[in-house]
Image (spheres, rainbow, N blue to C red):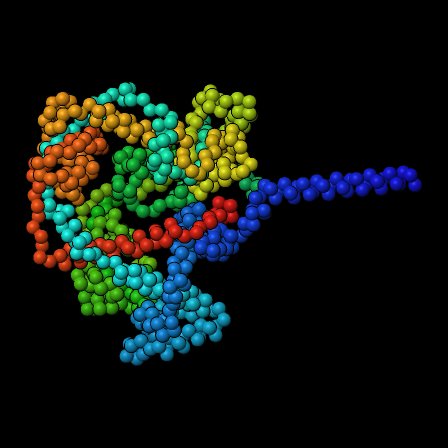
Amino acid sequence: MAVLNKIRQRSLILILVIALALFSFVIGDLFKNSTAFSGESQDVVATINGKDINRLDFQQKVKNYQDRAGGRQTSTQAMNVVYNQELRKIILESEFEALGLSVEKDEMRDLLKTSFSSYPEFQDANGNFDVNRLNAFIANLKDLNGETAPLGNFVVNYDSWTNNEQTIAANAIQQTYYNMIKAGVSATISEAEDEYFGDAKTVDIRYVQVPYTSIADSLVQVSKSDISSYMKKNEEKFKVDETREIVYVEFKEEASKADEDKIKAGLLALKNNRAEWNESSKSTDTILGFDSTTNIEDFININSDINYNDSFLRAAQLPAVAKDTLMNLNVNDYFGPYKDGEYFKLSKVIAIKQLPDTVNVRHILVPFAGASNAGPDVTRTVDEAKKMADSILAKIKSGTKFMDLLELSSDKVSNENDGELEFAYNAGMAPEFKAYSFDNKTGDIDVVGTSFGFHIIEILEQKSFNKAIKVATLADKIEPSEETLNEVFNKMSKFEIAIKEGDFNALAAERELTVKPITFKELDENIPGLGSQREVVRWAFDEDTDTGEYKNFSISGFGFIVAKLVEKRPEGLMSVENASITAIPEIRKEKKAEMIRSKITATTVDDIAKNNGQSPRTAAALTIKNTTLSGAGVEPKVVGAAFGLAQGATSKPIDGEKGVYVIEVTKVNEATKLDNYAAIINRLNSQRKNIVQGKVYQALEKAADIEDNRAKTVY
């Protein structure tokens, strides 16, 4: 019993230890995830003016956007687009709600009429919009319970229709909102006068410039306190987002010279026949090589990374690295192996032909429903379109004139030229259309199918015949061998082990690796040359990643990088060191201006110029709207000062962009007032209304209460 009691006591202790361990694990995880205490939800992507963007809804919209984009955008790019759309929507809706803007039922019907009046489904027998047909269509969609119905060239269901209605309504409200703002934007007569005199009134001056370059930079000392003071006076220039700086080295998985030599040898080996044991027949078969094969297409498609191309090619269509040599070969001659991009190739000329560079054809186009550029009135099926095209061809071959049947063609543009088209072999025509026109003879006529429908094509003329060749090419993609991949991985691993105790930069230099620095913001994704690398950015911003830590990352299609976190830079003013690049030149300029002003004791342009080794200059017909000073460049302060002086007056020293100036106004050319400023007022009104929409949204976004959690929730 005593033993059992001890076991029970120890069991209780063990249970307590386990419980404490679990508790510390949970608590530790809570501290690690600060949102557990802050109340921030991982399901909220952002909160704008008190309205949340839900993570699941957001991700679904991102997926839909990427589907529509066809994979042409990265996930981060898609997220940014959708986030900006949602941000704009919520900000504007906040304004609309505050103003009580909405679309009522009758207005919605008018909007739908404007959007869909051209659709035959909503027209009566006279082609007029029929609201009853629209109502019946919507009611039918609702009864279909999610099933789709055709509308024009599309299919829609009740959900997609209501979504479209919401979009139309939102656009209408937005237009009303901006129209209200534009109605309140107008220029005054006073503003029109200022605009007019800004061009019409001119001033002539004499001036002297004492350039900042007259004082050597070495004579002007700039301290850290100077930079700090300058930063405080110009905070907007030096505000920065939170960033992380990393350095990294690359380990590329590239084919070695031995790998390339092996690839080239493999291509050459395919020229010859080879013996291969046939397990089924228990005998040795002879596999024909490139030299002997009688089925070029199958041979290429079986042995090459690029499928066979049966077309005749002109010189411009051949690989740049091989075209001159290939065009000079005879039939059955080889060229290669040669390197073309990411492939080694072995090419054999199998036919030579003279082909035209330009053709003139005429055609009749019979489209089908869903074909490219087919109008909503086209309802025939593919089979019906083919049958119609064949019947037109039969009529032409039986004696009916081509011209008499042109009215059956939907290509109204070519119809204006008797159905004729003249184009070169490199024109952007449908491939099937082009192939028939160039590969056949003058006088040939046939039906050819393309994405636009079925064409009855007659070749009228072929011109500028030149040599073209048909080339059979074996291509083998240049890829590293297993041995090379292992070697790259080992080099990367050894580097990682070494930097545990050694200096990252020094060890990289020993191995002839280039250390590349890059600075990220939290929502960035791209590394130059490596594309989207969000994993690297997330690691750099992870709270558990400390300065000095390093990690390797596998880069798809590239190899590896080993990255080291160098610095964590908080949001706010940049460091004095980083600010010095832009601050020091400006501070030097200020100090030089002070030094130059202290030396100016004379009061006339001529005396100041003489005392400072400069020559007086003149500038005529200055306008307040053009800040370029003849002989000096852009100097807004100097030009502005000229318009603040009376004729004959001389200015005090002015700190300009390139030096300290003193100016003398020699003539003021006053402009005659206009009797009517209506034209200028109209122009100003038009300009302001054109930009007001963008300006208003920028102001609304700046004023909005935005809590952006993207980096923590979806990125």
The residue located at (42%, 29%) in the rendering is 516
Residue 631: give x, y in percent of width and height.
13, 32
Residue 417, by quadrant, is bottom left
Quick check: 41 left or right of 628? right
Task: Give the mark count.
Answer: 0
**In the rendered image, the vertical position of residue 486 relative to residue 120, given as above or below:** above
Residue under the image location 40 percent in, 34 percent down: 574
State left or right for residue 171 relative to residue 442.
right
Q: Residue at x 21, y 43 (%)?
A: 466
Location of residue 681 (image quadrant): bottom left
Residue 108 visible (yes or no): yes
What x and y, as percent, mark residue 548? 51, 29
Say which quadrant the N terminus sits in. top right
User: Is residue 527 shown to the viewer in this render?
Assistant: no
Task: Identify the residue at image location x=46%, y=73%.
Answer: 142
Viewer-side residue, 167 vs 620: 620
Relative to 593, is 157 above or below? Answer: below
Q: Nearer the viewer, residue 272 or 136?
A: 136
Residue 639 lies, in percent from the top left, at 16, 38
Name the image quarter holding residue 295.
top left
Residues 98 and 569: in front is: 98
* Left or right for 617, reference 488: left
Q: Nearer the viewer, residue 694 or 218?
A: 218
Q: Position of residue 241 (x, y in %)?
A: 42, 39
